[in-house]
Image (spheres, grey):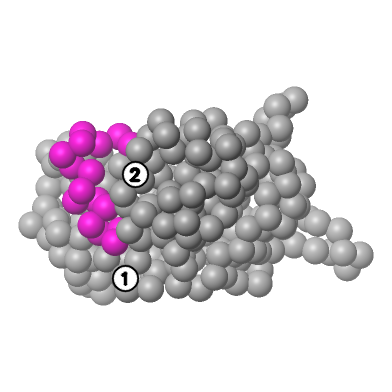
Amino acid sequence: MLRVAGLCKRFGALKVLHGIDLDVHRGEVVVIIGPSGSGKSTLLNCLNFLEPYDEGEVHFDGVLVGYRLDDKGRKRPMSHRAMSELRSEMGMVFQSFNLFPHKTVLQNVIEGPRIVRRQRRKEAIALGQALLDKVGIGDKAHVYPANISGGQQQRAAIARALAMRPRAMLFDEPTSALDPELVGEVLDVMKTLAAEGMTMVVVTHEMGFAREVADRLIVMDHGRIIEVGSAQEIFASPTHPRTAEFLRKVL
């Protein structure tokens, strides 16, 4: 579903991604771990072109992300409309919840389907309520974000992403801004999505979640993928010294 080839990203003179190659198969849960500053979030942002990449290619279900090819095979920027449509197929959940504070939880969830999908209000409300029930906060539909906990806000953000009926979900450290006692309720929602076959790419520091849910574990350091394998293999016997050093500090 996702194919990344030779991906490079620079911020000025600083190169933060060095030729990343990665395939994510349909229904697979890929978890990315590694020390802070290793390029994990930048990679995730490049997957749906929130960060334009400088070299290489990203394909989503066979479609080149961020660019189109002209008659001579040269890359040209993808139109804003086409990019918006492509992004709607890849739900994104961030560290911060990014909910509209002046809208209720339900209004936040139905905003995308109403504006981007042109869904009728009645249908959007029914879908939004069903998704809020799914993530366990159906009783908070008419409450404003400021009046619910951080864990509930993040579950609302997940429901908002799911409301676009995406074919894949990207999670950028979705529990890092939460108090420890609220982490579990968000991870439980993500585990349910994984069990239902949702294609997921997850950047996280939650090693227990990675061990339980990941079909494949990706370890990054200094903008490179240094190790790939099953969570069981990597946690038990990492082959790269930097992986072993990182795991000793976090486990």
What residue is drawn where x is 54% and y is 70%? 25
Furthest residue toward front: 237
Find the magenta span and give its range: 176-191
Location of residue 169 (image quadrant): bottom left
**Mark 1 secondary-structure assignment:** helix
Q: Residue 181 location, x and y as percent?
A: 16, 39
Furthest residue toward left: 139
| Residue at the spot of label 1 | 195
What residue is drawn where x is 21% and y is 34%? 179
Q: Is residue 44 left or right of residue 113?
A: right
Query: Magenta: predominant secondary structure element?
Result: helix
Q: CA distance from mark 1 to mark 2?
A: 18 Å
**Mark 2 secondary-structure assignment:** loop
Residue 117 visible in this rendered orientation of the protein: no
Which residue is more in the foreground, 237 or 10? 237
Q: Residue 37 location, x and y as percent?
A: 54, 30
Q: Give the label on residue 92, or none.
A: none
Furthest residue toward top: 13
| Residue at the spot of label 2 | 206
Residue 62 visible in this rendered orientation of the protein: yes
Q: Amino acid at mark 2?
A: Glu
Which residue is more in the foreground, 165 or 231? 231
Q: Amino acid at mark 1?
A: Ala
What residue is drawn where x is 27% and y is 66%? 192
Q: Residue 107 location, x and y as percent?
A: 24, 54
Quick one: label 1, few (<14), some, or many (20+) residues within 10 Å? few
Location of residue 138 (image quadrant): bottom left
Query: In this rendering, is residue 23 above or below 42?
Result: below
The tag earlier along the polypeptide, 1 or 2, is 1
Q: Residue 72 location, x and y as percent?
A: 91, 65
Specify whether residue 184 is painted magenta: yes
